[in-house]
Image: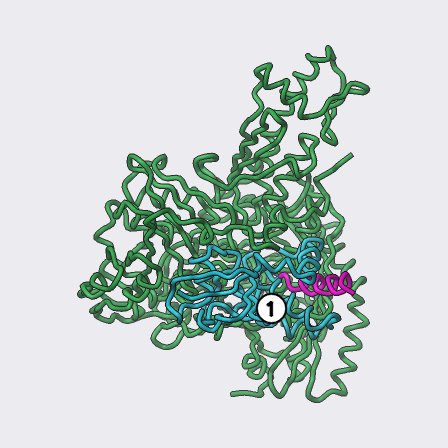
Amino acid sequence: MTHPVGAPLRHESATLHVQGAARYIDDLPAPAGCLHAAFGLASIAHGRILAMDLAAVLAAPGVVAVLTAQDIPASNDCGPIVHDDPILADGLVHFMGQPLFLVLAESHEQARRAARLAKVDVEALPAILDIPSAIAAESWLMPPVHVQRGDADKALASAQHRLQGRATLGGQEHFYLESQIALAIPREEGSLHVQSSTQHPTEMQQTIAHMLGWAAHQVSVECRRMGGAFGGKESQSAQVASAAALGAWKTGRAVKLRLDRDDDILITGKRHDFAYEWEAGFDDHGQLQGLAITLASRCGFSTDLSGPVNDRAIFHLDNCYYLDAVAIRSLRCRTNTVSNTAFRGFGGPQGIFAIEYILDDIAHHLGLDPLEVRRRNFYGLPGNDACTTTHYGMPVQDNVAPQLVDQLAQECDYSARRAAIAAFNATSPVLKRGIALTPVKFGISFTATHYNQAGAQVCVYADGSVLVTHGGTEMGQGLYTKIAQIVAQALGLSIDRVRLSSTDTSRVPNTSATAASSGTDLNGQAALAAARKIRKRLTDFFSTRHGLRGAKIEFADGKVSAGEISEDFTTLTAAAYRARVQLWDSGFYATPKIHYDPASLQGRPFFYFAYGACCAEVVIDTLTGESRILRADILHDAGRSINPALDIGQVEGAFIQGAGWITSEELVFDGAGRLRTHAPSTYKIPAASDCPPVLNVKLFDNINAENSVHRSKAVGEPPLVHGFAVFFALRDACSAALGAPAPLQAPATPEAILRAIGGMP
Amino acid sequence: MITLNINGKSTRVDVAPDTPLLWVLRDSLQLTGTKFGCGMALCGACTVHMDGQAIRSCTTPVSVAVGKKIVTIEGVDRLKVAQAVQEAWKRLDVVQCGYCQSGQIMSAVTLLTENRKPSDADIDSAMAGNVCRCATYVRIRAAIHEAAKALA
């Protein structure tokens, strides 16, 4: 019997991908007369626009129109939550690289060349560029948030040991290989169809409709696949989609806007960088007794998703650990820099980084193995029910961190290797090794409760072939493959009988972003609900047709059977069609059990938690600061995996991406607010040579305690946190070199490593 | 008019001689399997073969390609090595988002044509110019080894 669910089936586009035949938006044949657009960008971080002379732009070869904020008929805004995100600057420049105007020309090159010809007169205003200056000026994007449990001050005062500390964690550029792109096509009677590389077609639809003063049903947005997204195309695809739509509305011609790489990096937001300051109290065994901490993030000039990103940092400050008396202050800094946004993990990793740094400090202070200190602080200490509730009031009922960590520590031979590394370091003056084993617990669900819904439509044609459409988008994570597996299984078919259509707001409406790792959880359930309705009708039809009553009817291997009576699925669907049985249906899903109070951040924001752990071993060169990952072992909890091949691929990729973030990827803004690392020449993402020679990834044997789709667990974001094992292994190596806890900051570039070991001023 | 040899066929295009080969392939010839990534020869998404060598088409003026044999992802499967690479890629489920993979495959084919038994170090060095943001590198390495085995 075929069981598509749980099988390591290849990605549904695998054959197309290896032939170069999988089409992205820039590969679609452009409609006749298609115009090409380019933004003109601000060259100052903060200022008042006194005049924009666009005559030379308009006169340039091939230019058809130049649009500014004044050309926007209704709402000049592409902000996802708060309406403070101009599509084109209106009066004020908020960051260097902000789009000021849009050029429409006959060719891409003509548009880009013309965009350089504007004369823009801007009166400079004082710019706040980084977290320290924002804190000094109390420049908040939204008011500081405080979350506390117990009395942290009292707990600190009575603790056996107290440590103060601080750390910084850099941001991260998404660097999706397919830059932001949209193709807007005018249709009849005031309507537009927009091909958008976006994780959130519905939001693109709404933003464009608002911009034009239209109703939602006048705009349809479609996306078949993205060439990477990683959160960068959740809200921030809107500026490009809106601008293309504006151009199409204004000219009546199709408009394509594809950002050049440098422009993309300058215009679009990144992962929030964070700065932390804390005081921790703990006992002789390293068990935390009290913690007071400030988390400050650089949000950039507009709200975007910074609220929920910073909330998620608060929700993940505990990681796998019980925080008894804790006081958290979260500062959301407004700066004159690009508006930071979602990035795989969405603030969760930034919360986890802090507590891991703190436990690392405690271990060094007490001379204990950091893994031992981590273990002593895990949730769910035996016989103590009080230690199972998070600081935001959610009981941790599915905790597998202790078992999972034990299994990994044993399988990767952590203790023996730690001893061997100490011996190596004792006799190696220049090269120093380090090792760390860090866990992750990651909350699954959108914290914005209303996002936790999804729809899907399953069409069974009379010939028995199946077409599925749903609200999720494909960005390489394998969502379409998993949905096909789920539907195929429900109808007893092999996966090649099920085809996925592109995601389109005119087929499934009111969709949520494909984000928060929840694409399969939500859309898989919706597709399953639709498939079950069809299956039920076919079951009834089959029973009637064969005069069966109460018999068990099975759908498997392309057949529908009740004992000896069996017919092909295709025969049955053809007959059902002739008998006027509805062979298509829609399905809907809303995640149960979740609720929380956004003001106090108390409640149950997450349906469940996903877990994992990583052990990394590294070596540093104390003369040059260079480092290498020598080996990494990962054990990850994907529940009962729907597709282990895809899930392990997600874990491998997320680990490397996380390791890149905390080692080589450095965003450098100069004193004028200009991002100096706006190209692959200066912004270094991992290459093949940065991967460890040994990378063992295994899925933890587990099933979801909650009734998720086939008891699987979300897998997109949680494994990004495994990259932190690399950071703490590097810190371990630095501390070995320094002979004291090294103040290593992230990203741990060679310069940062040298600074941490006192080898560089 | 410029005459080019693309995927074994003689093709005439009407473009300026300094036009990057990438845009001739994509815009004039609708060979869209080769991708634009950075425009600076730094990401590898635009990799094609010129007389068997992996080159970055985004910074190669079309004039340089005149008289040379250009092979793109659309035509590479006529090489036995490429078939082995594509098969291994599918078998090991290398691809995630897929955008960089045409370039990865073109570089892998060049590597295996020149070196039938590459080590991990050979692979890392040959593939260093092809970045993958999904970080499928572990499987790329494994798939190149697997293709090498199939070709042995």
B143 part of magenta stretch? yes
* Type of the residue with mark 1: Tyr
View extreme (top): residue:
A547
Residue A599 visible in the shown view: yes
Q: Secondary structure at mark 1?
A: helix
Near mark 1 (Cα within 10 A), the count class, few <14, some 14-19 or many ≥20, is many
Residue B112 position by quadrant: bottom right
Q: Residue at x 40, y 57 (%)?
A: A258
Give the total number of marks visible in the rendering.
1
Q: Which quadrant of the structure image shows residue B13?
A: bottom left
Q: Is residue A436 magenta?
A: no
Chain A shown in which color?
A: green
Residue A68 in view = no
Rendered-image quadrant of the N terminus of chain B? bottom left
Whether A314 is drawn above or below A465: the answer is below
In the image, residue A246 above or below residue A410: above
Percent from the top left, x then y, of residue A757? 60, 84
**Chain hosting mark 1:** A
Q: Nearer the viewer, residue A256 or A168?
A: A256
The magenta segment is B136-152
Q: Which residue is mark 1?
A: A357
Residue A272 rendering spot, x and y as whole percentages? 47, 62
Across and down, in percent, residue A704 comes to 69, 43
Observer-nearest of A149 and B16? B16
Magenta stretch secondary structure, dominant: helix
Q: Nearer the viewer, residue A635 or A215?
A: A215
- Any idea which chain is the cyan one in this picture? B
